[in-house]
Amino acid sequence: MVINNMPLVSIIVTTYNRRDLLTNTIDSILNQTYKNFELIVVDNFSDYDFLSHIKSYIDERIRSFQNSNDGIIAVNRNFGIKKAKGDYIAFCDDDDLWMEKKLEMQLKFFNHKDIIGVGSSSKLMGDTKFYRNHKARSDKILRFDDLIKQGGVPLSSLMIRNCGYLFDENKSLLFVEDFDLQLSMSLNSSKSILKIKEPLISYRVPGHALASISKLYNGINIISKYKNVLSFWQYKQLLH
């Protein structure tokens, strides 16, 4: 479904061997109140018949691809970006869910020219013993200095202008490449990312510690990458 004279959103979902979770994710996307989008699903050659599974959806907005990423998910996210036709790009991991008004709510904020991306808070699924749901008191404008101190928005909540930005595919940024993208966009465009206070996604907490440990370790690589644009005191403070 393409509606003339309205923004077209390209949604990119990368996946690997999570058929049931992917099904729930796709269902939540197709259930959006805003209908003028394409859904690009990029599979890292899963063990099941991925292409047949996607074809079971009778929806012309879905485009399916398979591409090997050698364990670097940024590769397939970039693959999806290069296939995107929309004025805006949104991302969703294959185990997260969207609230039905997500796209509708986000699109209205792009009327502000100084906004390059819009994300939101999230509700949590899974073992939340060491995690808490957090809803901000108000919408937040996040510039580069804010992002480097506070962190970015969850990738599955992020929608950006389609301006040619790509994820860094360096292995040293595994699990933090989405944060790096937000930093790069805000720094190079001098524009901001808006974080909506209302949770627009349900985020699945990782069931293992590896991702969390790697995210923490590679976060140091993020700081090193942007060392040249940080003051001495900012750099020292972030390392501690």
Image (cartoon, grey):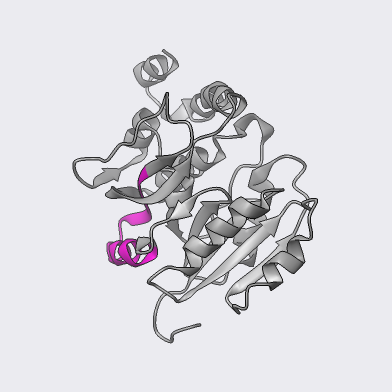
Residue at image point 64% right, 66% down: 83
**Above or below for 166 versus 61:** above
Numbered marks: total: 0
Q: Quadrant of residue 50?
A: bottom right
Q: Where, quadrant-wise, is the C terminus in this rendering?
A: top left
Q: Quadrant of residue 6?
A: bottom left
Which range of residues does the magenta coloring cover? 103-122
Magenta highlight on residue 180: no
* Residue nearer the viewer, 195 or 156: 156
* Left/right of residue 220 with respect to residue 229 in the rendered view: right
Residue at image point 60% right, 79% down: 60
* Left/right of residue 15 with respect to residue 195 in the rendered view: right
Q: Position of residue 154 (x, y in %)?
A: 44, 43
Q: Position of residue 91 (x, y in %)?
A: 51, 55
Q: Position of residue 194 (x, y in %)?
A: 31, 50
Q: Is residue 157 visible?
A: yes
Q: Which residue is most to the left?
A: 137
Q: Which residue is most to the bottom?
A: 4
* Residue nearer the viewer, 66 or 217: 66
* Residue nearer the viewer, 72 or 135: 135
Q: Position of residue 47 (x, y in %)?
A: 80, 51
Residue at image point 37% right, 60% down: 102
